[in-house]
Structure formats: C-alpha cells, structure tokens
Image (cartoon, rainbow, N blue to C red):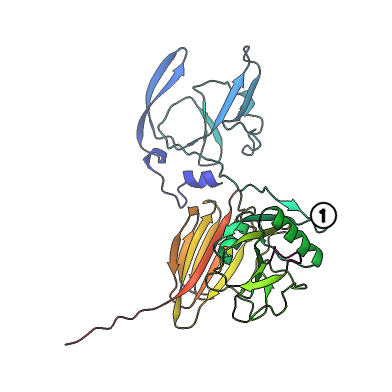
Amino acid sequence: MYWRSVLNGNNYDTRDALETNNEVHWQSWSNGTWDNGTDTTYNGLLLGLVCTEDSDYRDIVWQWSDGSPIDYTPPGFEDSIGNYLCGDSYSWYLRPNGFWEDNFKRPPIDVYCTTQLEQPVNDGCEYDPDDGVCYRIGASANSWQDAQAICRNMGADLVSIHSKEENSFVRRMAVAYGAVNGVFLGGTISGKGKEFGWIDGSAWKYDNFYPGFPIDGLGECLTMDTLSAAGQWINVNSSSSFPVACAKKDTVPTCISGPWTEGQIIYSPGYPYDASVSCNYVLTVEAGKRLEVHVKLLEANTCCDRLILTDNYIGGNTIANLTGEISDLTFYSESNIMRVTWQPNGGVNVRGMMITFNAFETIILSTLHP
C-alpha cells in the first residue's frame, strides 16, 4: 500500500519518470536481436525480484534481491511468478493498481531503495534470579538526566529498588563493575511534589537512606553509596556526575501521562525497542511564558508514523507534523501549553522519539519615540 501511494502521487512528489504521457525510447531482446521502440513513460516501480535456475532451465527459484523469501504477493498472483522465465533482461514492476507486471522493456524510471536501520543491541545485562530483572552498570553520566538517557538507549530505566535483597544485588554488581564511589538511582522528586518517586513509575515501597537523609534543598535525585556495604542512599543535585545503574523489565510498553517537568527527557513508550504504542504528552510551563520543545531524536516510518505538536490542550494550531529521521530540532508554542502526540501506525523497526522542553519568555520590543 505504501509503494502504491508513491506511484499514485499520494502526498509524495513524483518526478516525470513516474508520470504518464512522456515519450521515451526503449530496447527489448527478441529472437536474438535488440528491438527499438518509442513509448510513453512506464508508470511502474522496479521490484527487487531476482531468480536462479539450473542448467536445464527446469528449476527456477524467485526471491528478493536481499535474499529474503517471497512471503507476500498481490491477490490472485500467488502461483504466477514461478511460471516465468529467468534472465538478466527480465524485470518485474509494481503497477499503480497494485499488480506485479513483467516487462522486457527498459523504460527510464525512478529507482527506490530500502535499507534496514541499525537497531540497538540489548547486551551486557545481568539477571537477578530473584526478580528476573535485567541490570546493567554504565559509564559515568554528567547529570541525572544524562544517566536516564543512557539507560533509555539500552531500553531500560535508571534502577528502582523495592527490597533489601534488590538493594544488595545492585550494590554488589556496581562494585563488581568498578563503580565503588556511588551510582545514580532512578529516584527523583522532579514532577512528584516533595516526595521521592521512581522514574519508571513503580510504587515506592522501600528506602535505604543514610540517617538524616534526604536533606531538603540538597538535591532532587538519588545516588547509592556503593563504598558502604549497606548501600545506603543520599540525595544529590541533578547536575552531579556518577556511573549509572540501569534496570530493564520485561513489561508491555505503556503510555505514561506525566506530569512532566522542564528539562526532563521524554520518550515514546517502549523506546528504543518497541515504538508501536501511541501516547499523548501535555507539556506546561508558567503562565505568561511559552514552550520550546527540542526534538532530540525522531525515528519513524515515513509511511505510517507521526509526531504531532499542537498548541494548547485541544483545538490549537498544528506547530509541526513530523516523520522520518530527525535530530536536534526545536519548535515553539504560542501559549504556555503544548500537546505532543506520538502516533505510530505499526512503529516497525524504528526507535520512536526522544524530546525535552523548557520555558522561555516572550520578549515585547517597544518603539522609542523622539
């Protein structure tokens, strides 16, 4: 359906080579000689179908040029391709009606290519046999936000801890990987009032603070003191630098409604391994200010997936309608509210989106009169 829409010019710019009523010259091989002729432009898309055959021309095998088997053909076409000859001059085309057509001619047409995007590799994890969670200790991050970004790129979150046994496991693993002077945990008060909560949304049902901690005003993020055998916790400023402790749970990607705070990195559900779940994010800043949303990364299929930015909660103007591969673009709202909508239609083999936002003041320039 996607490639048919390209042929039919549905929201795509097709050049003359795919349009009809343009005179072209062609050659075809017939009875041992080349025939020449004139025709209108062939409105078809060259398919990557190739074939092999034995020396007796009896056993013909068709497959895709990337080596994959033919596991889809148009309706009514399932058994037809095996009945055709195999040869270098033989080509197959997708026509605007969706049918596959053989053609000995060599008409000039646009050529479209596809490639498999490099996907993140989920490696280096160690599983706690007690809870089945996959843990990983990463390199030092320059801030708590950077630490969460490192974990998200592994398909994980900064670790949440729910028992003495889990706390001990994380501490031992950190020391084993050389993180002997502390690691970032997934606890923060950002967006959760004055109470600490876990960034992965899990319930807060266990803590292991040093006596007297957390100290109000000292910092809004949590670290574990791995030098201490007890692995006790301290609250620190978000701009501190520590190695990261990540945890990946085998859960179904879920849309989290927030609330979201300025500077927080927001991801599509399941990032970066599963981009198939849609989600709405309502971002707000102080009244009288406007938002700037920074798209740190977008990886979406141009046929199907969209990231839409609109002003206000509902009924506002569309600020941007994005797809494809995008990084480091900034967009601005007209009010102090912006709605960000991740709308995948499949989200196949892409990572999804990663954004952050901040407030900026509207500057009104006055005119000086003499």
Instruction: Kindly indicate the quadrant of the structure image that contains residue 129.
Output: bottom right
- Rendered-image quadrant of the C terminus: bottom left
Which residue: 76% across, 57% down? 133
Query: Which residue is under mark 1?
Result: 129
Instruction: Kindly indicate the quadrant of the structure image that contains residue 232.
Output: bottom right
- Give coordinates of residue 163: x percent, y percent: 80, 67
- Give coordinates of residue 21: x percent, y percent: 37, 38
**In this image, 200 relative to 27: left or right?**
right
- Give coordinates of residue 152: x percent, y percent: 62, 58
Pick the residue in front: 75 or 159. Answer: 159
**In this image, 108 relative to 177: left or right?**
left
Crowd class of label 1 (few under 14; some 14 to 19; many from 20; radius 10 Å): few
Q: Main secondary structure of the magenta part?
A: loop
Amino acid at pointer 1: Pro
Which residue: 47% across, 39% down? 112
Pick the residue in front: 341 or 18. Answer: 341
Which residue: 55% across, 55% down? 305
Instruction: Point out the stretch of residues depicted in magenta.
Output: 225-231
- The residue most toward the right is 130
Pick the residue in front: 207 or 324. Answer: 207
Whether residue 250 is visible to the viewer of this picture, yes or no, is: no
Image label count: 1
**In this image, 234 relative to 127: left or right?**
left
